[in-house]
Amino acid sequence: MGRRREPLQALADETGCFVVQADAADSVAVRAALKEIHGKFGKVDILIANAGGHGVGPTISMTDETWSLATRLNLDTAFVCARESLPDLIAQKGAVVVVASIAGLFAGPDAAGYVTMKHACIGFGKSLARDYGRKGVRTNIVCPGWVATAMADEQMQVIVEKHGLHSIDEAYRLVTKDVPLGRPATSEEVANVICFLASDEASAMNGSILTVDGGAAVVDLPTLAFVE
């Protein structure tokens, strides 16, 4: 489910998946999407709350509109889709995976909107796990680091221009130079973790927070000077 028809159709053409064009933060649109899904597949077993982005810029100059957009895209989408899907998920004893970010664990520069909402996504996932675990609904949270995607490529282009680099690949190497694996994740690597959490193989996991960041979260920042 997404707001833009073109990337949805491209995904459908590539994978054969069923797509619904809708705004995940709009409760009316989500209810309509669920009605369409019910007619085709029945009740929902798994919800992946994966929308996000925006909220970047210095706090001192961030507009109300930017802050509100960060809230809507990152937090409202997860809340609305979870609320509307919970009757199905309870009936099916289903699973929720909230896709946050390591920005939900740490603070990147000049990104207060994004950082705050990803922290909130983790809190929301914990609340779902606490409140609905006894009803058979498992909720877990994934926190990716850098992932080589079209959205991240746009951010790498900023790095290319800022540092006078020659390619996006050089930018990825620069932003992951202190990451133990030394590279960004692929979307498939993150998807594999999400699929595991949503599967019966993770049946005892509820409220867990998993980083998929190449080891970035284990690095002790004050010691980086010793390896420069």
Image (cartoon, helix red, strand yellow):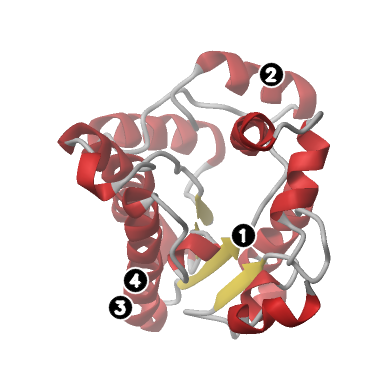
Rounded to the nearest whole Å, what is the CA distance between mark 4 and mark 3? 12 Å
What secondary structure is found at the residue carrying circle 3? helix
**Whole-number angstrom distance, CA of label 2 to CA of label 3:** 37 Å
| Picture residue at 69% right of the left edge, 77% below the top | 224
Query: Which tag, 2 or 3, sits closer to the chain's start?
Result: 2
Callout 2 touching callout 4 (CB < 8 Å): no
Identify which residue, 217 or 202, lies in the foreground.
217
Q: Residues within 10 Å of mark 4 (few under 14, many from 20)?
A: some
Q: Is the residue 220 above or below the residue 89 in the image? A: below
Tell me where residue 143 sits by quadrant: bottom right
Residue 35's spot in the image, x, y percent?
38, 33
Asked whether, in this view, residue 32 is left or right of residue 156, the answer is left
Rendered residue at 75%/82% (across/down): 226
Residue 214 falls in image quadrant: bottom right
Q: Which mark is residue 131?
A: 3
Determine contact: label 4, label 3, CB under 8 Å. Answer: no
Instruction: Return the residue at label 2.
Output: 10
CA gap, disc 3 and disc 1: 25 Å
Q: Secondary structure at mark 4?
A: helix
| Kind of residue sitting beneath label 1 | Pro
Q: Which residue is mark 1?
A: 144
The disc, 4 or 3, on the residue closer to the chain's N-terminal end is 4
